[in-house]
Image: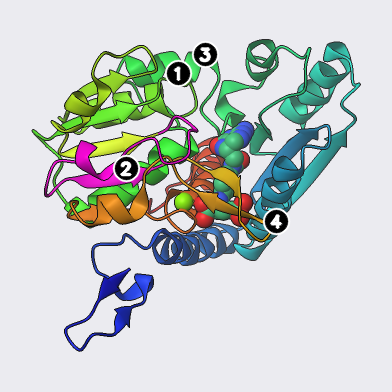
């Protein structure tokens, strides 16, 4: 917590170093609502997003509910498909085939993680690449890494939009991404390369991770380990993007969300930092809707302002 010149604690949302992901996501959602209305006004069908949830993971249920609510709030149609954790791979693939063929569906998303023993790669690769609003299909991942037009996965796109807003031009900056997942680390590396950053991907086997992180102008933490990144791992003046969402127990027997970065320590050193909650998280769903509108416009051969 920062203390003001008059000795008062400064609420986090007024500290200009703290990147307000919720506000930036809300502004994007408002833009999307205008774009959707403009598309519909031209006589085009309402864009539609289908979300497939398998099993009863509590966090996934919250995210899927939130996706459906925000989809409708920006004026698009939401289709939810809930399947039991015991669903067979063939039955799940049949659902995806139906959504691929459904003209009312512009975007398809399978909520991750999938329960075992379902093979996520096989299932994601069944989605029509033109409806793959997560950008996880191997064709889209390949296109992104080849520098071709492709949907950018939602969390990396959210990180990029936050960085553009907080930092401005990214060219020439050294970005260190801690985490090499297909959902965040790898696609974000491609996106930041496209912005002419110098990109290093680090992971659990990286030697002297702290020393590497201290070289970063942009430090992205996406490992899922609460508080891994300490204040003395951050270069003074760096921008820190915390993608981690970790639920930890509190002294009163409840839980709270924290990121992968020791926030108060890093805030003392960094120029700018995203909080958890309220940083990257809200951008993920806003960017999903942005990708859905882009997919809908592309399928209709229509222009859109994004
Ligand atoms: N098919 C996909 N599965 C998953 C993705 C994804 O992009 N596509 N990402 C995550 C989960 N996720 C969306 O699906 C997601 C995570 C977090 C948030 C969010 O708004 N977080 C809030 C806190 C919310 C809370 O209290 O739990 C925040 O950080 O402020 C939105 C979406 C894995 N699966
Ligand atoms: Mg966050």
Q: Position of residue 220 (x, y in %)?
A: 32, 36
| Residue that numbered label 2 is attached to | 160
Q: Where is residue 129 in the image (x, y as percent from the top left)?
A: 57, 22
Give the main secondary structure of the magenta stretch. Answer: loop
Q: What stretch is highlighted in magenta?
A: 222-242
Q: Would residue 102 be found to the left or right of residue 220 on screen?
A: right
Q: Is residue 260 above or below residue 89?
A: below
| Residue that numbered label 3 is attached to | 138
Along the line of sight, the residue nearer the viewer: 69 or 46:
69
What crowding class fits label 1: few (fewer than 14 Cα within 10 Å), some (14-19), or many (20 or more)? many
Q: Distance between the residues labelled 1 and 4?
A: 42 Å
Task: Tell me, for residue 296, which label it has, or none.
Answer: none
Q: Residue at x 91, y 21 (%)?
A: 86
| Residue that numbered label 1 is attached to | 141
Q: Where is residue 255 in the image (x, y as percent from the top left)?
A: 64, 53
Q: Residue furthest left?
A: 172
Q: Would residue 17 be found to the left or right of residue 119 on screen?
A: left
Say what secondary structure mark 2 lies in: helix
């Amino acid at each position: 917590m920062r203390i003001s010149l008059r000795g008062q604690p400064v609420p986090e949302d007024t500290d200009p170093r703290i990147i307000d992901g919720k506000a930036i996501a809300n502004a994007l959602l408002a833009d999307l609502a205008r774009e959707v209305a403009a598309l519909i006004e031209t006589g085009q069908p309402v864009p539609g997003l289908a979300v497939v949830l398998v099993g009863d993971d509590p966090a996934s249920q919250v995210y899927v509910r939130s996706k459906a609510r925000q989809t409708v709030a920006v004026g698009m149609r939401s289709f939810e498909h809930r399947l039991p954790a015991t669903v067979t791979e063939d039955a799940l693939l049949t659902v995806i085939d139906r959504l691929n063929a459904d003209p009312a569906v512009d975007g398809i998303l399978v909520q991750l993680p999938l329960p075992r023993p379902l093979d996520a790669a096989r299932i994601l690769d069944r989605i029509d690449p033109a409806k793959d609003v997560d950008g996880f299909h191997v064709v889209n991942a390949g296109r992104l890494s080849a520098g071709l037009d492709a949907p950018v996965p939602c969390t990396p796109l959210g990180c990029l939009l936050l960085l553009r807003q907080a930092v401005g031009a990214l060219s020439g900056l050294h970005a260190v991404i801690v985490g090499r997942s297909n959902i965040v680390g790898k696609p974000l590396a491609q996106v930041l390369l496209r912005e002419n950053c110098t990109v290093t991907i680090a992971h659990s086997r990286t030697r002297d991770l702290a020393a590497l992180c201290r070289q970063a102008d942009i430090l992205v933490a996406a490992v899922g380990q609460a508080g891994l990144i300490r204040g003395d791992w951050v270069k003074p003046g760096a921008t820190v993007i915390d993608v981690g969402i970790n639920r930890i127990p509190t002294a009163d027997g409840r839980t709270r969300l924290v990121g992968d970065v020791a926030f108060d320590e890093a805030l003392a050193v960094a120029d700018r930092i995203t909080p958890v909650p309220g940083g990257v998280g809200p951008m993920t769903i806003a960017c999903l809707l942005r990708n859905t509108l882009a997919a809908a416009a592309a399928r209709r051969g229509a222009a859109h302002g994004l």
